[in-house]
Image (tube, rainbow, N blue to C red):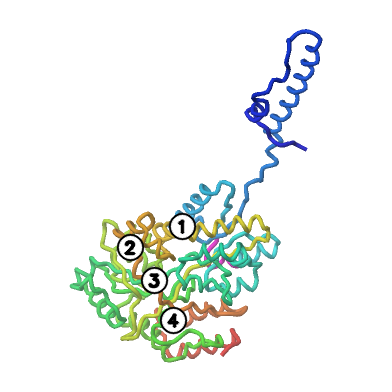
Amino acid sequence: MVGPCVSPAMIATMFRGRTMFRGRPHGRRAPAAAVALALIGAMIGALIAGCGGDGDEGAPAPVSLSFVSYNYGTPDLGGQGTQQLIDGFEADHPDIRLVASGATSGDVLTRVQARTAAGDPPDIAQIGWSKQPAALASLPVVPVADLAPPAEVAAATAGILPPALAAGSIDGRLTVMPYTLSTPTMFYNATLFERAHLDPARPPATWAQVRRAALALATLGDGVQGVYVDAANPAKSDFLTQSLINSNGGSLLSATGGPQLASPPAVGALAMLGDLTNSGAQPRIVETDALSLFKAGKLGMLVTSTAVLASLHRSAKGSFTLRTAGLPAFGDQPARPTYSGSGLYVLTRDRRKQQAAWQFLKYLTSDAGFTVITAKIGYLPLRQSTVDGRQFLGEYLMTSPEILPAFRQFTSVAPYQPLRGPNADQARQILQDDLVSAVMLGGADPAATAASVNERLVKLLGAA
């Protein structure tokens, strides 16, 4: 066993002010003194040796945390921003090391489930809100509320916007840490607006106004298109679908979890999407083509997640003026968007790793963390203090205020409604492909298609 580490300075202090051997240095006492000095020298050598070599084994080794993220490792700004968050955390916490790996948003839950089944779950995972019920049912989730004493959890989450905390709470307990959230935003090309004699200072506030503005933009020629509503997306995300139905006075699901696609509000929202395309206000193209068109300055309006903000901002620089507005409304009904994004799930059972994971979660959701999440990636800052603080986003927003409309409408968002049960992913894919895409891009009849798809979802979900 290695003894405690004693430095030469400590030893000097031990003997300071003491005379070990008095009298003459020669004579009968000299041999005894020599022996004593030799013993003391050996003791000092042994104590000093304890400070190095095997003595380091007494210090705790750095904690290594595995982190699966669908933003990590991507070549876009999302990947760069995530790496910046990891680097910043490790600089502040040299005793904790992140071992990150990437996955697509659609595959991340499947990969985490496979690792869990093999006995090697990641310590932390970023999982989308649409997969929350399946994640909670199939993974060894450690609630955030259990990672630290209640007072510490309350202090760390104080200031996070209530809708975000509600998104991660189950039965009133914070279970999943809200991480990246966005609401649907209308990006618009103010330069094209001016060319079409539209007032960039007064963007369309209703879908009827959007249609009129889009048709005016489409008359500019040179390949310019009016508007694109990113509801039929390859990720099969239904947050925009839900936002449109909510804003028209309905909801995707009933109180018992049954689909309500055949309801008048749902059919009306779908009919609006189809009419935009059929009238020529919206091109009949897929999401990737719409994003390319907007970045090239050839699309007047794009309604989508704020997650693409950083990318659009970079494309617009020096080419056209980028501005944003909130989700348009249906007539005089208030817009009621829901949110997309993800939460952070802690899965490790190791108490030391749980403590390290808690430090990581606190860093990611701090003012410093949300500054990177917003400025580098494009998701919402979930703290008002992040928006107000000049050292955080205060100065940035003075020159880049595009996130503010989405941030303002977040305070009144409707809760996201995830489909539940073992067939939830299949049901959401049918909803997006066979209904939303079919009406928006395929010209299908809204009412008849909604009724048919609703029947299929009732059978899949087992709820009416």
Closest to the camera, between mark 3 and mark 4, is 3
Find the distance from the CA under tag 3 to the CA under tag 4: 19 Å
Q: Is residue 234 visible?
A: no
**Would you name the residue on which mark 4 appears?**
438
Reply above or below: 406 against 310: below
Q: Earlier in the sequence, mark 1 or mark 3?
A: 3
Task: Examine the residues drawn in magenta and state their main secondary structure.
Answer: loop
Assign a secondary structure to mark 1.
helix
Residue 369: give its label: 1
Does residue 422 belong to the magenta stretch?
no
Closest to the camera, between mark 1 and mark 4, is 1
Q: Position of residue 443 (x, y in %)?
A: 39, 83
Residue 295: give its label: 2
Q: Is residue 129 visible?
A: yes
Residue type, label 3: Thr
Q: Residue at x 48, y 81 (%)?
A: 434
**Would you name the residue on which mark 3 appears?**
304
Q: Earlier in the sequence, mark 3 or mark 2?
A: 2
Reply above or below: 327 against 351: below
Residue type, label 4: Ala
Q: Earlier in the sequence, mark 1 or mark 2?
A: 2
Residue type, label 2: Lys
Q: Earlier in the sequence, mark 2 or mark 4?
A: 2
* Placement of the N terminus among the 4 image quadrants: top right
Q: Which residues are magenta?
A: 103-109
Closest to the camera, between mark 2 and mark 4, is 2
Please tell me how crowded label 3 is: few (under 14), some (14-19), or many (20+) other residues with Cα within 10 Å: many
